[in-house]
Image (cartoon, rainbow, N blue to C red):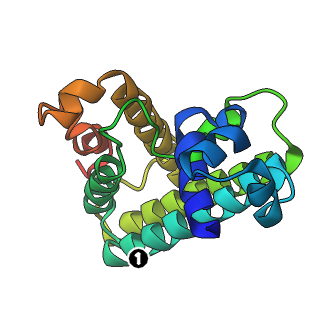
Amino acid sequence: MRTKILKIAEEQMKAGGYTSLSFGAIAKELSTTRANLHYHFKNKESLAVEVTKRFIADQESDLVKMAAQFTGNFPKYLEGMESFLWSHHDCNGRVGACVCAQIIRQPQVPDSLMSLAQRHFDFMRNMLTEQVVESQKNGTLRNDVDPLVIAMQAGCVMTGMAQMALFMSEDICSGNNPLKGTLKEWVKNYLPL
């Protein structure tokens, strides 16, 4: 039961963040009572924290594996990141790919959730920066630009793509993805001259 609750709660949070998390809707979908849900999770915040921790752990595990695969080749790493992004895009409505991105948009989110989301974004920034540094050492990226600048710009482009995907869901899900290749084109600005 706990696993089913977490799965539904994650979908709710991807769709609308903390404010969309509803014990009543989960209970209805599972044909159970709210009391049964409260047996597994004390309150909305404890459920949201568990969902967010699990989401972050899964996503970061996948991203670490990808980073190891493309260390020293940031352009190929970004191609992998883009594939990762599109594989996590939900074609069943306007559901985001990231729980943390939904959390940071909302007012009055509990500090426990905001700190988890911040830690995840710090992880992403550090991972991107490390990839840039290794690529600059290998000569696959120009080394006359601060690695943090490139990393932060890459993060902005990825975030923008994820947001655009929400509005262009029908095109993307039908196979007509005008955003595909955006990271590959963007990174050309930083290839060696």
Q: Residue at x 65, y 53 (%)?
A: 32
148 left or right of 113 in image: left
* Residue 184 place in picture, x, y as percent: 23, 45
Q: Vertical placement of 106 versus 155: above or below?
A: above
Q: Residue at x 21, y 35 (%)?
A: 173
> Would you identify the image quadrant in which residue 4 lies?
bottom right
Res. 100 visible in picture: no
- Nearer to us in this view, 175 or 136: 175
91 left or right of 154 in image: left
* Residue 14 place in picture, x, y as percent: 54, 42
Label 1 secondary element: helix
- Nearer to us in this view, 18 or 32: 32
Q: Residue at x 50, y 63 (%)?
A: 59
Q: Vertical placement of 158 versus 170: above or below?
A: below
| Image label count | 1
153 left or right of 20 in image: left
Work out which quarter of the rendered image holds the N terminus and state it.
Answer: bottom right
* Residue 2 place in picture, x, y as percent: 65, 68
Q: Where is mark 1, residue-wise?
A: 65
Farthest left residue? 175
- Nearer to us in this view, 57 or 93: 93
Kind of residue at badge 1 = Lys
- Nearer to us in this view, 33 or 135: 33
* Residue 163 place in picture, x, y as percent: 44, 29
**Disc 1 packing (10 Å; few <14; some 14–19; many ≥20):** few
Q: Vertical placement of 6 versus 11: above or below?
A: below
> Would you identify the image quadrant in which residue 139 lies?
bottom left
Q: Residue at x 63, y 39 (%)?
A: 25
Res. 94 visible in picture: yes
